């Protein structure tokens, strides 16, 4: 008679480590020895840790659920322990199913009171390391695809700034288990974000290609205007620099004494001040260009001649260069490849060729049909595509 453990949960919470009686009972139910049973439990616990389970559930409890699920099946549907590989594979599949079931919504409700999906999404909506709006939107879409446990792990690591060891201590797990789960969540998040980012990049690339094509179409019209503007600015700068050299304004001498009003001596007979008398000023001699010591020295003359030379040579050359550049730009923009010409179709006015009608008439009379050249020669014409001309 096969003994089964009670399926109803006991009053007290189940222990993490089962008793020896439970181990012996489960081993005998499947026809296994104690060493074989211990090896099977270790293998199933490795599968459960790989899948992952909530923090409040121990992997050994998930293994016990898998054993109970196997005992609930009819004996005819159980795998025989004589085929060791198939039996271990079947039990590991049951452990994997039990682990996925424990990750369901009924076990996640215990964590919902402390940390809900809305709170996690609000906490991760504006992280400090994602300043870009498009990247933030992609992150929000990717986070919506994760479950509550993965979001809680990301929240603890990135928002609360907890290390892997601290998270492992809080969840009473090994450091390697938490680290592997965090790496798996990163891979899921990266895969979810790649689809959104790739779509965004393709959209930007298409817009950039369209803008580039539009700019290329407008370059042909903007290039002549830009050339004219550049030439006009060059001519304006050259004329502004050269034009002051032609000025013949007389420089003002600095050594001319200014008029000084002198007050007349005070007299005792009158209280009124006499008007000031203008002081005689010696006539100023005109400045000559050949006098040494004046402002119009030899260096000034050389600068003036050089400026005049530039004005007579550079400005015409600038106009010629501007016209040549404009002509070249216009020729380059107007030079286009002629569209391919379609081959001319043969003109068919409809009906029969008069030569064909004449040939059919001669054949009907039993006469030989003349060639088209002979038939046209009788009419005094030359053969054409249709009839004679």
Image: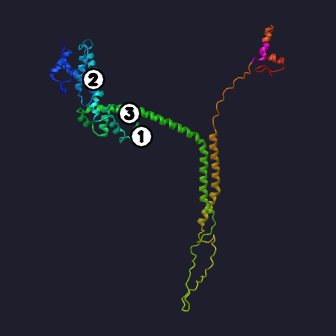
Q: Nearer the viewer, residue 303 or 144?
A: 144
From where the camera sits, is residue 103 visible? no
Which residue is found at the position 23% from the left and 17% from the top?
Answer: 71
Check residue 133 in the rendering and tell me which mark sits there, or answer none: 1
Mark 1 falls on what kind of element? Answer: helix
Instruction: Give the Cα distance between marks 3 and 1.
Output: 14 Å
Check residue 98 in the rendering and tell me which mark sits there, or answer none: 2
Q: Main secondary structure of the magenta part?
A: helix
Instruction: Give the Cα distance between marks 3 and 2.
Output: 27 Å
Mark 3 falls on what kind of element? Answer: helix
Residue 110 part of the magenta-drawn span: no
Mark 3, other Cα within 10 Å: few <14 / some 14–19 / many ≥20: some
Residue bearing the label numbered 3: 142
Q: Which residues are magenta?
A: 351-359
If you read the primary sequence from the N terminus, does the residue marked by circle 3 or circle 1 appear first?
A: 1
Q: Position of residue 11 (x, y in %)?
A: 18, 26
Residue 340 lies left or right of residue 113; in this view the side is right
Residue 10 lies left or right of residue 231; in this view the side is left
> Which quadrant holds residue 334?
top right
Which residue is found at the position 80% from the left and 10% from the top?
Answer: 362
Q: Position of residue 272 (x, y in %)?
A: 56, 87
Q: Residue furthest left?
A: 20
């Amino acid at each position: 008679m096969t003994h089964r453990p009670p399926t109803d949960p006991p009053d007290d919470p189940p222990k993490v480590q089962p008793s020896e009686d439970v181990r012996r009972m489960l081993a005998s139910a499947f026809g296994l020895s104690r060493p074989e049973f211990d090896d099977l439990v270790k293998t199933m616990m490795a599968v459960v840790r790989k899948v992952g389970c909530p923090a409040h559930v121990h992997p050994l409890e998930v293994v016990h659920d898998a054993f109970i699920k196997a005992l609930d099946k009819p004996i005819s549907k159980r795998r025989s322990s004589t085929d060791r590989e198939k039996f271990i594979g079947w039990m590991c599949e049951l452990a994997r199913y039990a682990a996925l079931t424990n990750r369901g919504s009924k076990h996640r409700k215990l964590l919902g009171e402390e940390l809900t999906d809305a709170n996690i999404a609000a906490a991760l909506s504006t992280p400090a390391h994602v300043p870009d709006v498009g990247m933030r939107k992609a992150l929000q879409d990717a986070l919506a695809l994760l479950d509550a446990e993965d979001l809680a792990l990301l929240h603890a690591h990135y928002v609360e700034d907890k290390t892997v060891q601290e998270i492992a201590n809080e969840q009473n797990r090994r450091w390697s288990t938490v680290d592997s789960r965090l790496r798996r969540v990163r891979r899921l998040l990266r895969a979810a974000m790649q689809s959104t980012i790739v779509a965004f990049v393709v959209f930007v690339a298409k817009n950039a290609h369209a803008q580039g094509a539009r700019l290329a179409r407008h370059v042909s019209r903007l290039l002549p205007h830009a050339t004219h503007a550049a030439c006009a600015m060059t001519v304006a700068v050259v004329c502004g620099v050269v034009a002051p050299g032609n000025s013949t304004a007389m420089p003002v001498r600095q050594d001319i004494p200014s008029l000084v009003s002198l007050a007349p001596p005070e007299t005792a007979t009158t209280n009124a001040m006499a008007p000031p008398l203008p002081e005689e000023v010696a006539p100023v001699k005109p400045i000559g260009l050949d006098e040494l010591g004046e402002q119009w020295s030899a260096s000034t003359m050389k600068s003036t001649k050089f400026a005049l030379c530039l004005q007579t040579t550079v400005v015409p050359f600038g106009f010629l260069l501007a016209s040549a550049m404009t002509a070249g730009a216009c020729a380059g923009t107007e030079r286009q490849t002629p569209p391919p010409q379609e081959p001319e179709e043969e003109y068919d006015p409809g009906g029969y060729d008069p030569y064909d009608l004449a040939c059919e008439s001669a054949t009907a009379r039993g006469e030989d049909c003349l060639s088209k050249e002979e038939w046209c020669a009788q009419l005094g014409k030359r053969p054409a595509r249709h009839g004679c001309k």
